[in-house]
Structures are given as C-alpha cells and as structure tokens.
Amino acid sequence: MGDQRKLTTLGNSTYKEQAVWFLNAYWRQFGQQEAEKVWTYAHRYASLDSNGIAGHSLDEFGAHRFLELNNETLTVVAMREHWRKTGIEHVKLVPLIHFLIFRYQVDWHQCVNAAQGDNAEEVAKAQRMLEEAQAAVKEAERRDTEAKAAQRELEAALAELKAQEDAFNNKTADLTKRSNEGGGVSRNKAKAELAQHLAEDPLPLRRAKINQEAAVRKAERASKAAEDALNVAVRSLDAAQEYLNEVSSRPGSAAGALWWIDRELHEARAYLPTARGGYKKAK
C-alpha cells in the first residue's frame, strides 16, 4: 500500500484511532509531553462532528471553527497549501491526522509508516477491559438514576401519607371536641360519627399507606441494585487499571495507546462517588 493510500486510510479511522496512532509514532520525541493537548484536539474535533468521537473528519467550516476554538493562528487554507506542496491534493475534508501532522510539522510519510508497538494483543485486551469498565459505569449511572427516582417517589408517598394522616387526625380532633360540646343530640351525633370515623381508615388514608409501603420496597430494591452496580463498576475499573499498569511496565509498549486508555479510565472515574474513587471534573 502506498503512503498516500495509508494516509487516506488513517484519515478515515476514528478521531481516537488517529490521535493514538500519532502519539504512538512520536511518543519519545514529543508525544508524551503533548499527549494531553492531543487528547483535547481529538475531543474538540469530535464536539464539532455530528458523529462525535466516532467521526474522522471535519468540513472546511468545521475545521475553521476548530482552529478558532484552539486559538490557532493557522488557517485551513494554509493547511491545504501545505498538503499541496507535499503532493496531497483534492482534500475536501480535514481529518484530525492532517491537522496534527501540520500542527507539529512532522513528515507525513514517516507518520503513516511509524511503528505502533509490538504488544497489539495486550493493548487490545486493555481496550476490551476499558470498554467493559465504561459499560459498567454507565450501568451504575443508570441504576443510580433509577434509585434517585424511586427515592423521590418515596418522598412524595410519605408527603401524601402525612397529609392524609393529618386530615384524619384533624377530623378526629374536631369530632372529639363536638362530642363533648353543645346539646345532647349534637353530642350524640358527633360521638356516632367519631366511632364510625375511628372504626376504619378512610379510603384516601388506606391508599396512601399502601402506596407508601410499595414506595419503600421499590426504593430499597433500587438502592440495592444501584449499590451492586456501583461495586461492579469499581471492580471493573480497578481490574482494567491494574492490567494497564502491568502492560505499561513492560518494554516495547505502544505508549500512546496505553496513555489514552489510562486517560479514558480516569474520565470514567469522574462518574463515581468521591468516596469510591471518583472526582469532580473541572468546569
């Protein structure tokens, strides 16, 4: 496969894949120092693409917007001119890799032929463990949302129960007072009403008690499911991190790919409670 075809193929891969390829290629020269910036470039590209991080290129308007967001003084026209001078013409879209090559002024032939590490299987396994952990975190988020909704339902049921109990107690107090005041006929009538009132909870109160009991059971189930899902997420993240650290300690690693996985694991932990290893992302 010729270099131009390799560049096209690379430019058609996802933003993450383009960024990881670039970091792997130049990790020792400058990639390690620039990794966080490349991460930002990739995610800003994705933010301007309707396909998100699964996208691969921006049109000229999107590329202009990207450059503005990054306070870059270069222009899309300048990039196109650069590519024409190096033999690449008729580029309608701007892949991330085009920007990175131009931004860091590296030889594109060298870039597309750069070694990507000799531990592809280990990197693939680390990626799978990352994806499993990310899925577990999403499930934990879903369960947490359900638990919070169930708690809100319980609070509403408790409020309704209190309102019905207050109404029942107020009526009891009123009938008790009336049964001890006034003429004999009115007292007897009030006593009869009070006896009937106290004999059985009125329908609204019975319904409120039933709903409250059901809400308690639902909230308890939801809370338990959320806690279980959170435990799974934490274990998955810890296992992925442990394996990643092990692979990273060995020679010959695809350092850029491993750094990216580590960065994604760090992002995933932002959705955990701080008491379980989470953190608050900076705004």
Image (cartoon, rainbow, N blue to C red):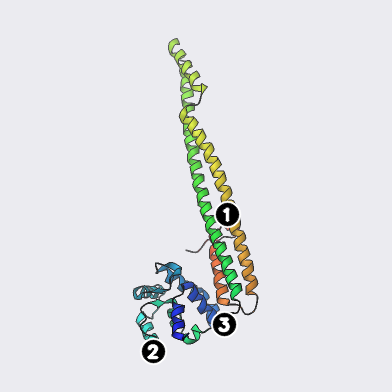
Among numbered discs 2 and 1, the one appearing first in the sequence:
2
- Residue 143, percent across and down? 53, 52
Let me know if residue 54 appears in the view.
yes
Q: Name the residue at 51% across, 73% down.
A: 36
Q: Residue 105, relative to residue 37: is it above or below?
A: below
Q: Which residue is mark 3?
A: 28
Q: Is 35 placed left or right of 80 in the picture?
A: right
- Disc 1 marks a residue whose amino acid type is Ala
Mark pair 1, 3: CA separation: 39 Å
Foreground mark, 3 or 2, reads 2
- Residue 176, percent across and down? 49, 20
Q: Name the residue at 62% across, 63% down.
A: 238
Give the image quarter of residue 67: bottom left
- Disc 2 marks a residue whose amino acid type is Lys
Q: Which mark is residue 85?
A: 2
Q: Name the residue at 51% across, 24% down.
A: 200
Residue farthest to the top? Answer: 184
Mark pair 2, 1: CA separation: 55 Å
Residue farthest to the front? Answer: 1
Among numbered discs 3 and 2, the one appearing first in the sequence:
3
Q: Which residue is mark 1?
A: 229
- Residue 65, percent across and down? 37, 73
- As helix, strand or loop, the secondary structure at mark 1 comes to helix
Among numbered discs 1 and 3, the one appearing first in the sequence:
3
- As helix, strand or loop, the secondary structure at mark 2 comes to helix
Q: Residue 172, relative to residue 181: is it above or below?
A: below
